[in-house]
Amino acid sequence: MTSRDLALPLAALALSVLLIIGGGYMTEHIALYRAHATAWTSALLSIPALALFLARAGTRPLGQAWRLWWTLGWLLIFVHLWWGLGHLHSWDALSVFVRQGLLIAAPIFFLEVVWLIDVILAWTRRDWAEARGWFLIWQWFAWLVTVANFFVSLVVFRNDLPSLVIGMVMTAVLVAVLLQRLARAEPGAAA
Amino acid sequence: MIRRVVNWLAILASLVLLVAACLWFYFERRWSAWDENGPSAEPYSAFVAGPIGLEVFPLKYAVVLNEISREAFLVDPEAASFREPEKKLSVWEAYGFLPNPASTGQAPCGPDAGQELPFGFAVTDYLPLSAVETPVEFVGFTCAACHSGRVRHADGFSDVIVGMGNPELDVIGFSDAVRTAILDPELTVDAIYKAYGEICPTPQPDGMVDQVAGWIEGQIERQIIAAWIGQFRSTVAEEIDSYGPPRWPHGAEIHSADTPRHLLEPAGPGRTRPFRSVVRVTLELPGVENMAFSKIPSVFEQRSDLRPRSQFDGSILDPVTRSFIAAYASGATPTALAKPEMARSVRQAAAYTETLGIEVPLPAFAETFPELAPSPAEIEAGRAVYRTHCVACHGDRDPVSGAWVPEGERLHDIAELAEIGTDPERVLFPNGPLLPLSLWTALPQAGAPLEAQKQRLVEAREAALSGRRYAEAQLWSDQLARLNLNSRRFRLGHPLSFDECTGETCDCAAEQRGDAAPEETRASCALTAELGYVNNPIPGTWLRAPYLHNGSVPNMRQLLNLDDRPVAFCRGANIYDPVAMGYDVQITSDPAACPPETPFLFDTGLKGNANTGHDYPWPRADVVDDPVKQQELDALLIYLRVL
């Protein structure tokens, strides 16, 4: 890992944390703001990882950048759990299900677990960058769970303007990358 | 090479920021830890020192307010104290705050600074409105700031009487003056620190580490105070856009230079405009036309069997809900009131009012004025009159045990306006019928009760739409949006939220259109809209002056129609007249004739100030030429000293 790999993701993380801390003092309810801000920044930081994966998975090595952005995105969704479950629900996980219903609450907890496992695998398996077989299937699964969760939370529910904007940006980037990948996959495009 | 250096610098800066962020989170957790054995732990200390979300300004500003904002508060720099003429009049005294009995007379510096501030001020680490904890100390009001008073007699003062409404406190004027002061462009962090340094010189700490730590702490404090000034100014600017500028103390220029005070800000000492505030915070309406004045009430003997419903109109069922609404109307946000310490303060303070005057004794009239202590024969004679004319509505004290007995066939009934004849503004103010639902849904519950709250708002909106009251329907839509937002903030329900209906079956929606609440609604609904005043016990009668809900009758002789009720009189730091049982006031209709210590002209001809009604036992016309009735009333007046 080089300084070039590390500089941008770390700077993005530091700015995100500043936004999470500082922005809270400008609002009436610091815990709700921080629960939201951690979700926004998690989505923002994972956009590069989601895009890199979509562009490269199964065809090219994912690269250090993917692993760093993917890990930092997870780190912020973990902090989101701290503010959302810890502060807003007083660590009462059952109350999340009672309030939001199984269909909404279960995928969020599922995402936390799947993303965590994928991050652990990314830092422990030698073939993390060029997965094949079941491991590649698992990575695609983790990617899909993450994209689906963010899309539903940010675009479908669109609780606030930042959520909608970030969700639309994420969607636009992923659609563009997908089209690029499909175009590359066509025999004529390679020539 | 340059790119690598830039990359490493970025990494280094990011790491420094992340470490600082981790430290900040760590300190945030330390700051937010609250002392479970602090003031909110027990009822008395919660009442006098427990935070209830009414933080106003930083402690450092409170310390220097007399120096740097005196003009904004319109306090003459040369004026002498009413209490101690050799001293200067302070802003606190000019607005009627009580001196703290624990004060040592020192400058308010160091860890005991709070006790050098007026009684009922709490020093906390909560930011105003958001109640986020920081290392900066803020000053907030507790229940005791308004609900504590002293009897000012010719020779001095009584001790502070906790639970008595402060008859001198000009709380609305003070609140407007604070808003004016914050807009002073000369109020800056530097100005606060400069003045503070002169009052509380801070020695430079020894050692490099302590100096650096002190510098960092100082910078954080300065930034937070600067942010407070900026944020408060924005809030006041928004309020000016919504409600108009504060008219006191510098509103005269907006009107004309000689507009008298009582026309600018008409509440005056010892009174509030609670429903203007409630309409503003709950319905987000200006409430400018709201003249529902209320004297700051005493809160004695609030136990539910004695006083099943609170407020002068009996519109609130539970004492905790009453205390929540009092704090909410005074500016506490639901976010602040959800803090465990604050929610506990509200509950404990409410519990204190249920014991105050029962388990916790009140000072007796005879202790304060021993020369006027009634003899057993006088008590007996007066009691006979009381039991003939007053007991049906107010109950009586048991002469042996001294306990208030909730007897009387009309006790706890609502006396309708046509019958009681007192000023109607307190119950007829615009938008009053909308408040029960709006207040109930201000604090979200959780689960099925939350769904019931939403459903009631939807029903209210639909009812308004079907009645073609489109503006009201929009208002309920806004209330529903607010409930949805708050239900996301308080996922497990707000700790002070309450049920709309406390009985098995209720129809709390029945009164939505402003009809008086039916009996069964009153018995079981947490909040009602009433069109009259409730008959309640009157413990500590002698401490309840001035009389009637709007404080329009200075003393009991006038309330009993032994004397004429004055049409206009001067209010402020009035001397207590124990013979008349109430305040000795200068009667005049000329505001310029009011002396400096009682500067406010109370004009009973103005809207909300009427001194009519409650002509019991007899109207003035029946008393004036009837010596027998006068004799009975004299006896009654003496008996009222012991209640």
Image (cartoon, rainbow, N blue to C red):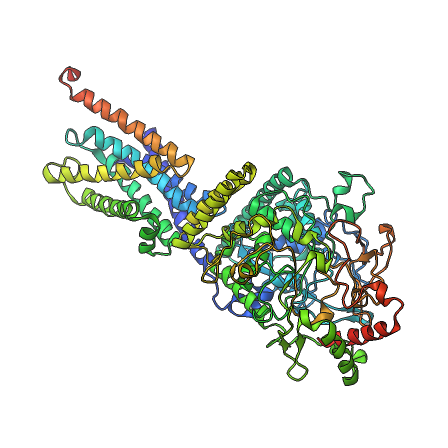
Which one is in front, A61 or B597? Answer: B597
Q: Is residue A31 left or right of residue B45?
A: left
B623 left or right of A52? right
Residue B361 vs B377, above or below: the answer is: above
| Residue B382 x/y as whole percent | 77, 78
Name the image quarter holding the N terminus of chain B. top left
Q: Please identify the residue farthest to the left as the structure is shown.
A: A133
Q: Nearer the viewer, residue A175 or B86?
A: A175
Q: Relative to A154, is A58 on the left or the right?
A: left
Query: Is A17 left, or right, of B255 in this rendering?
Result: left
Residue at position x 41%, y 35% in the image: A162
- Along the line of sight, which residue is nearer the eye, A31 or B321? B321
- Residue A104, image quadrant: top left
Residue A137, located in which quarter of the rendered image?
Answer: top left
Across and down, in percent, residue B364 comes to: 71, 77
* Residue located 40% across and 39% down the image: A159
**Above or below: residue A52 compared with residue B147:** above
Asked if residue B100 can be seen in this view, the reply is: yes
Nearer to us in this view, B141 or B579:
B579
Residue A100, percent from left and from top: 33, 48
Q: Residue B618's spot in the image, x, y percent?
A: 79, 66
